[in-house]
Image: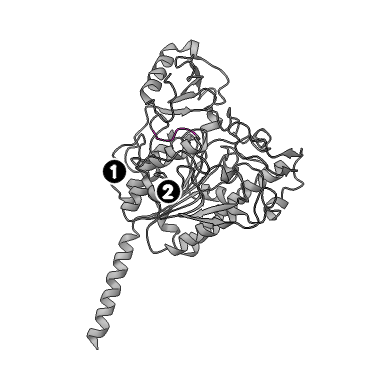
Amino acid sequence: MMKKIVLPLLSALLFTGASAQAQQRPNIVFILADDLGYGDLGVYGQQKIKTPNIDRLSRQGMLFTRFYAGTSVCAPSRSSLLTGQHTGHTYVRGNKEIQPEGQEPLADTVQSYARMLQQAGYVTGAFGKWGLGMVGTSGAPDKKGFDVFYGYNCQRQSHRYYPTHLWSNNTRIDLEGNDLKQKKVYAPELIQQQTLAFIENNRSKPFFLFVPSILPHAELSGPDDQYYKQYEDAFPETPHKGNDYGPGALVPGYASVDKPHATYAAMVTRLDAYVGQILDKLDQLGLTQNTIVIFSSDNGAHREGGADPVFFNSSAGLRGFKRDLYEGGIRTPFIVKWPGKVKVGSRNAFIGAFWDLMPTFTQIAGAPRPPYTDGVSLVPTLTGKGKQAQHPYLYWEFHEDNGTQAVRMGKWKGFRKGVMKDPQAPLELYDLDKDPAEQHNVAASHPDIVKKIEGYMQEAHVESPVFPLTAH
């Protein structure tokens, strides 16, 4: 009898020990908003839109005040995020469309940190918008390290909240009742259900959950529910035809938006509610203490489809919006919660960017160090242990409107427009300590700083045959 009891007990103890050892590595949840401005959250100064769950996340963790997206539009910013390279090096540097569906795919030689986490034993899932390679191409989610993908593969499709279809891994999921005139199936809710199911299904394994939400990207649209009703009569409104998407518009036929302010506010609050549901699911499953949660946005606030970032002060007083390399186009909310590691309710002024996530995540997961990255690990800043490496500078490119380059070097910000026509165009220079809104170009007073930043621009940019910037 004793042997029959001891052997199963021993097996159980061994299994429990193995599970505990695996779970010593924290789960990683990265939630990425789409076109959410630096000032769209309560903790970053928003006065008109309610974001209680993200505000709570901030109170439980660390809020960064000088963190930056990969660039000021979707695909290249996400490429920078996943490859650990700034836009002078990363493969995808613009929103290059592929017909009939999809965008320029990441090359098969490009490694993402999702693949590195996968190889280190993490279960990996992505739920939301992809935009880095259609199903069957070298840039598809399953080719870049994700065990599970559910959502919009193509960015053009993600302009609609009631699309004709989504993708579940390599399977097309048709949404009956959705077309240019009908709105029956609200895609973000389907994606959220799959997100929560991923957490449930992988509770006993270390997992990396990437949630590239499409909220609050234009179009301005959504259900007439509690998120909308709380704002329905709150703001002055001017009806707006929602098919005006500005530069890069590709999908016509959007429905009219009678109350664009209320609709946009509801979209942000819905995103906030989805964040709250993820946090609650982690609590319910007892995973909170062993999970790092990060929230950010892919670029600055948009002005498309009737959105009004001036009304909401979505850039928090910073200059510019989406498609700008001024601060309002690239400075992003960045909040990290890591129980027992990150100081609760702290604020941090570290100057970092999306390419820092690759070395950070691989260090946290115990994965091999990346063979190459433009980033530095944020672990010393997050934990307060060890010396934090600093960037000598940060660099960005934007490949629309004749091309723009920007460099942040300490307090200085250098900005050059029209580089496709003139790679040596005059440089604008701003002292962000004295002039955070970038109103006073002081290039003429600091020729030495201008020269140094010009050197960094030349150093950082490696010409791409797929996305040429300075070649003629």
In which quadrant of the rendered image does the C terminus lie?
A: top left
Residue closest to the eye, 323 or 431 = 323
Region in magenta:
90-94
Q: Left or right: where does residue 389 sit relative to residue 37?
A: left
Distance between mark 2 and mark 1 Cα atoms = 29 Å
Give the number of the mark in front: 2 or 1: 2
Q: Is residue 5 above or below residue 335?
A: below
In which quadrant of the rendered image does the N terminus lie?
A: bottom left
Looking at this rendering, what residue extends furthest in the bottom direction?
1
Residue closest to the eye, 353 or 381 = 353
According to the picture, the residue beneath numbered tag 1 turns out to be: 369
Q: Is residue 179 above or below residue 74?
A: below
Instruction: Say which amino acid is labelled 2.
Output: Gly
According to the picture, the residue beneath numbered tag 2 turns out to be: 136
Q: Secondary structure at mark 2?
A: loop
Residues packed near mark 2 inside 10 Å, few (<14), some (14 to 19) or many (20 plus) = few
Q: Is residue 93 magenta?
A: yes
Can residue 4 be seen from the camera position used here?
yes
Looking at this rendering, what residue extends furthest in the left direction?
3
Instruction: Say which amino acid is labelled 1.
Output: Arg
Q: Position of residue 199 (x, y in %)?
A: 46, 60
Q: Position of residue 33 (x, y in %)?
A: 54, 44
Q: Left or right: where does residue 42 sit relative to residue 204?
A: right
Q: Residue at x 23, y 86 (%)?
A: 2
